[in-house]
């Protein structure tokens, strides 16, 4: 039996959804509205730039669009572009993990039936429903890499980074979103747009403070930090790079040993790493027993010892980690002991707890 006979309202529903997507350039969100039974009215809900679909009809609508799109893909049925777009819109809103459907939209962009800017808006709405969907991020990168080809405009890339951070907030440990953001950072660096790293460095500091259990953002900051300490052009755009952490970490003799005439940015690079180390300490003190914070701290210790391979750094780090371990031992005994053991085995830093 044809799907039309099973659920004749499907065509009207997907047409209504497409009409909303076409007419509202500020559409913000899509989600399902739990409603187990039909209410004898349209199941499509549209309020304040937010689109919803009642749950009772999802299976019927998806069966309808899926069967027809399979026929279109197999070229078993002639279909005009507008009808295919309408089918794809509902199919991808409900299940964006079907790569074939995104490939069909790619073909429609290349044929001039879809605008890339509209597709960025549409896929951003899809991410509000499935914020970890890798296929959506891949599609957005394809649009930038093959169609727009512009990574030099701060407004465009900042908007993309905002989309990534919004998706990251919608799903815990959303590595797909953070990898997407860093891909844009890398492309921006290739175009010598160094200011974006400082923007993300400050932005994600706030994010980490609000999501202390989510290690994915901390890994993102680790990648940013590697860029910052490796290239002075990135450091130059940091708004606040002070020497307070340097004064706190080293004594005067040790600071004198750090000066490298050939690398005038060396002290600033260490400051950034030390600022992050003390920021991490503040979070550990405020939020007890979060393993993600200790993992991030181990990365910072490794960075300081292995990138800045100087004896005074290793000695200062030993004194600092002894201080913080002793301070936090009572409330974080398991994590402190693991941290001390790691320092001893991985970095050969001998620490004895009091």
Image: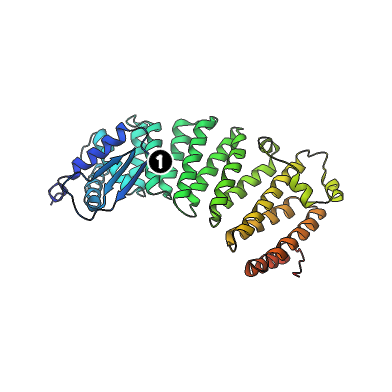
Labels in figure, total: 1
Q: Determine the residue located farthest toward the right in the rendered image.
A: 253
Q: Nearer the viewer, residue 338 or 72?
A: 338
Residue at image location 66% in from the left, 35% down from the top: 237
Q: Which residue is mark 1?
A: 124
Quarter of the picture holding the C terminus: bottom right
Q: Position of residue 229 (x, y in %)?
A: 69, 44
Image quadrant assignment for residue 300: bottom right
Where is 251 relative to 342, above or below?
Answer: above
- Above or below 241: residue 155: above
Residue 52 image point, x, y percent: 30, 45
What colouring does the structure picture have?
rainbow
Residue 275, given in percent of the width and then of the height, sits at 69, 48
Q: SS class of the residue under badge 1?
A: helix
Relative to 135, does residue 264 appear above or below in the rendering?
Answer: above
The image position of residue 207, as x and y in percent, is 55, 48
Q: Is residue 4 left or right of residue 282?
A: left
Q: Residue at x 49, y 40 (%)?
A: 162
Residue 76 in sight here: no
Q: Count neighbours of disc 1 (C-alpha within 10 A) and say few if under 14, some if 14 to 19, many if 20 or more.
A: many
83 to the left or right of 108? left
30 left or right of 177 in image: left
Would residue 336 be seen by someone viewing this image from the given angle?
Answer: yes
286 vs 329: above or below:
above
């Amino acid at each position: 039996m044809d799907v039309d006979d099973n659920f004749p309202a499907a065509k009207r529903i997907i047409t209504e959804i497409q009409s909303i997507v076409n007419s509202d350039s500020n559409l913000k969100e899509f989600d399902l509205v739990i409603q187990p039974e039909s209410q004898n009215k349209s199941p499509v809900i549209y309020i304040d730039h937010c689109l919803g679909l009642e749950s009772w009809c999802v299976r019927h609508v998806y069966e309808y669009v899926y069967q027809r799109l399979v026929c279109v893909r197999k070229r078993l049925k002639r279909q005009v572009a507008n009808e295919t777009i309408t089918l794809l819109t509902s199919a991808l809103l409900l299940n964006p993990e079907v790569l074939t459907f995104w490939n069909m939209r790619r073909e429609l962009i290349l044929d001039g039936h879809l605008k890339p800017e509209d597709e960025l808006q549409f896929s951003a709405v899809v991410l509000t429903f499935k914020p970890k969907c890798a296929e959506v991020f891949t599609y957005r990168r394809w649009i930038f890499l093959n169609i727009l080809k512009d990574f030099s405009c701060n407004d465009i890339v900042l908007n993309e980074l905002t989309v990534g951070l919004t998706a990251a907030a919608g799903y815990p440990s959303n590595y797909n979103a953070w990898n997407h953001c860093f891909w844009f950072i890398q492309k921006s660096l290739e175009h010598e747009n160094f200011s974006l790293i400082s923007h993300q460095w400050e932005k994600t500091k706030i994010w980490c403070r609000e999501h202390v259990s989510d290690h994915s953002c901390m890994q993102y900051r680790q990648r940013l930090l590697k860029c910052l300490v490796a290239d002075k052009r990135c450091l130059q755009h940091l708004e606040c790079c002070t020497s307070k952490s340097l004064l706190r970490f080293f004594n005067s003799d040790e600071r004198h040993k750090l000066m490298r005439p050939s690398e005038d940015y060396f002290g600033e690079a260490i400051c950034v790493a030390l600022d992050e180390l003390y920021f991490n300490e503040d979070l550990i003190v405020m939020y007890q027993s979060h393993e993600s914070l200790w993992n991030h701290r181990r990365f910072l210790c490794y960075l300081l010892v292995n990138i800045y391979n100087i004896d005074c750094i290793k000695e200062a780090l030993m004194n600092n980690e002894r201080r913080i371990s002793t301070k936090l031992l009572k409330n974080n005994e398991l994590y402190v002991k693991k941290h001390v053991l790691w320092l001893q085995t991985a970095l050969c830093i001998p620490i004895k707890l009091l």
